[in-house]
Image (cartoon, grey):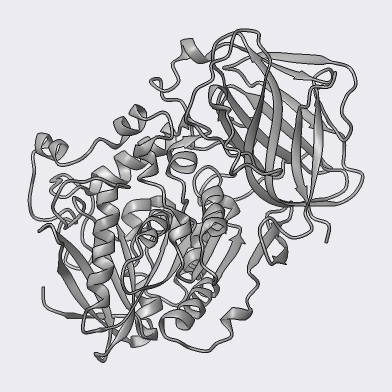
Amino acid sequence: MPTVLREAAGGRTMALDKDVEIRLSDGAVLRADVYRPVPAGKYPALMTYGPYGKDSHISQFMGEGWERLKARHPEMVANSTGKHMVFERPDPESWVPHGYALIHVDCRGAGRSPGKLDVNSPQEFMDFKEAIEWAGAQPWCNGKVGLLGISYYAAGQWMVASYRPKYLAAILPWAGTCDFYRDRTRHGGIFCSGFVGRWWQNSVLNNQHGKADSTLTDFVNGERSTGPASLAPEKLKENRFDYIENVRAHPLLDAWYQARSADLSKIEVPALVVANWSALGLHLRGTIEGFVGISSREKWLKVQTGPYFATFFAPDSVALQRRFFDRYLKGVDNGWEKEARVEVLVRAPDDTVRRSVRSAAWPIEGTRFVKLHLDAAGKMLAWQAPAAASSASYPALSAGATFTSAPLDRDMEIAGPLLAKLQLSCSKPDMDMFCTLLAFDPSGREINFATNFDPIPLSQGWLRVALRKLDPARTTDWQPVHSFDAPQPLRPGEVVEAQVEVWPTAAFLPKGSRLALILSGQDYKGTGKPGSSSSGFFLHNDPVDRPPERYDGEHTIHTGGGKASFLQVPVLTA
């Protein structure tokens, strides 16, 4: 398609090269939309690469959710017409008028790009590498390419950056996990069927190349986003790898998973990593771990709050993104290096920002890791370990057991990683442990927090107890890391120690607040009261991965008598 001029906010224009062909070394062809500044020249490029549709408006992916989000956060389109916004990718109107080329690429087998669809695969990442190297060599590019995007378009940055493509000069993953096993598909070894199933069906398969009944249309020309070809259902199935069956077929962290998680030590380009407390259950942990693990000397971590779709498009966030890329793609001496290496927002009980905490490292400097001990006799969380041994049992597929603290005798701020060390037994050879951490203000109202849609608890953690083996090289005093490579079945009634990684959190808890730790063998469904948090659609209820006859045993929590059962929380001291 020839270059056309597109309207942008403020009466400015952008050049759009539609369905540009990127020819790969194996003969495959990718198609991209390239937005460029007017007049023509050499500009740095920002690229996104993935399966969701380069030319389908964000409203088609989020439906009514997009309208609700805009109503709550009108700042997302304050400086844009919003006509060119696509799901999880930067808005051309925020970048092209400021001297950037923006490239949206459909991955192989998705949208306008033919081929066999294989998302989150080595093939996809190698294609991505070649696309970056194509972009850097174009006559309109200054030879520097940056990566920017949310979720899928953030997570892929870790992998492709570890391949060190020519021309890649900086990355900015915004709420995108780096760990394909632990964060995206198998929490604690348990298949994340709620998210993965919904994501695969609604977001990926709907945009498979050649899908004749796709609901996605090109907002530029009104054509079907999946291209002119109309493939029969049998051909579509033949043209893709079965993602869900592959995940089911690999319950352990084996070579298949390792090929889909980056070697972070190979990433050396400048990186601004933005995590969000609202990304509990998908991106929060892995975004922070990506920052910690990369070798880049020039790296920064920001942990925000609020709906991460809204924060990505907000004018102050775009200004932050632009300052970073101006420094590393344009060479502007704008003082970026003076930014705090780590900046964390601490949430208040009303879901506003209490304060911003700056640090030179993660976890935050001066953090004191404090133990709240479980006492099964009174279902309590206490600052002192109970002397007497006791136990509490519950049916696995029930609401479980709740351990509650006394009212706090002072204000407390927590921010950082958590863990639960538990002494457990079960009537069956395996058990899935679901840990949910709730907070209640002095009046007894639950303290929960906004996401893109439904409220979430303070934090959660998961573990398939037969996979409790720790990786000693990566485990720290504040974060257990499991190897997930060798099952250790339980003997009925045998007491075993397991450490559950509870995902990071940050909150101000006023004097009189209480903490509650719920231990169960199933997902947290909430209290049913108005405003209650829940696990949302981040569920783990796949009958193949969790057959009821295997995971419906009686769980028992053992405390006291020298048995260490506690919740460890990160308390800020300054």
Q: From where the camera sits, is residue 498 visible?
A: yes
| 343 with respect to 43 (left or right) | right
Closer to the camera, 348 or 375? 375
User: Residue shown at 39%/85% (left/top)?
Assistant: 98
Q: Where is residue 450 in the image (x, y as percent from the top left)?
A: 59, 51
Note whether 276 is above or below 395 in the view shown: below
Q: Position of residue 496 (x, y in %)?
A: 66, 19
Count the numbered circles shown: 0
Closer to the camera, 549 or 370? 370
Closer to the camera, 43 or 486? 486
Give the quadrant of the C terminus.
bottom right
Note whether 62 is above or below 11 in the view shown: above
The residue furthest front is: 473
User: Residue shown at 72%/40% (left/top)?
Assistant: 446
Give the quadrant of the N terminus.
bottom left
Closer to the camera, 548 or 27? 27
Q: From where the camera sits, is residue 55 visible?
A: no
Q: Where is residue 100 in the image (x, y as percent from the top left)?
A: 35, 81
Answer with the quarter of the image where residue 267 lies.
bottom left
Q: Position of residue 53 (x, y in %)?
A: 26, 57
User: Residue shown at 57%/68% (left/top)?
Assistant: 300
